[in-house]
Image (cartoon, rainbow, N blue to C red):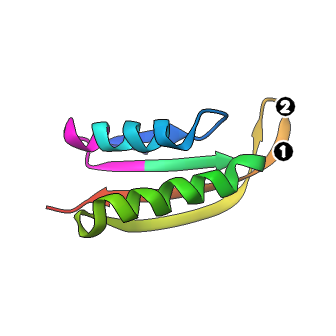
Amino acid sequence: MLSPQTKIIDIGKKHIDDYIFDAIVSFNEGIDEIIIKGRGDFISKAVDVYRILKDKLGDSIELVNVEIGSERFRGRRRSYIAIRVRRKY
């Protein structure tokens, strides 16, 4: 179960900078944790989003967990990665 202070960012066709901006704004608005989730072809893009976010924010965030698996998504079984990142105080 997700807490109200957790936001899921689903990675799709938008530019990587849009996801980075969304994550930074979420942290600035008081969200404590974000989950960067990429399915199928967007798994590598989710990892890129995490790496760029880590480069930009440095020690102010920490990697909590990385989950990989598969799930039913739009009627098909799709592989996914979920990268959980927490803001440090």
In x, y percent, where is residue 82? 56, 55
Q: Secondary structure at mark 1?
A: strand
Dot 2, crowdedness within 10 Å: few (<14), some or many (≥20)?
A: few
In this view, the residue in front, 50 or 1, is: 50
Other residues around mark 1 within 10 Å, as few (<14) / some (14–19) / many (≥20)? few
Does the magenta portion include 65? no
Q: Position of residue 76 (x, y in %)?
A: 86, 38
Q: Find residue 7 and report its horizontal and vertical position in percent.
A: 39, 39
In this picture, residue 14 sits left or right of residue 51: right
Relative to 6, is 13 above or below?
above
| Three-letter residue code for mark 2 | Gly
Q: Hey, which residue is sitting farthest right in the picture?
A: 76
Q: How many marks?
A: 2
Residue 16 lies, in percent from the top left, at 54, 43
Q: Is residue 4 in view from this perspective? A: no
Residue type, numbered disc 1: Arg
Q: Residue furthest top?
A: 74
Which residues are drawn in magenta?
Answer: 26-34
Residue pictured at 29% horizontal, 59% vertical: 57
Q: On the rendered image, what quadrant is the N terminus found in?
A: top left
Instruction: Residue under label 2, please give it.
Output: 75
Residue 77, labelled with which disc?
Answer: 1
Report if residue 61 is visible in the image: yes
Q: Residue at x 26, y 49 (%)?
A: 32
- Tell me the SS state at disc 2: loop
Q: Nearer the viewer, residue 35 or 4?
A: 35
Q: Residue 13 occupies which quadrant of the picture? A: top right
In the drawing, does residue 78 fall left or right of residue 14? Answer: right
Please tell me which residue is depicted at 58% across the width and 37% down the height of the picture.
Answer: 15
Q: Is residue 29 magenta?
A: yes
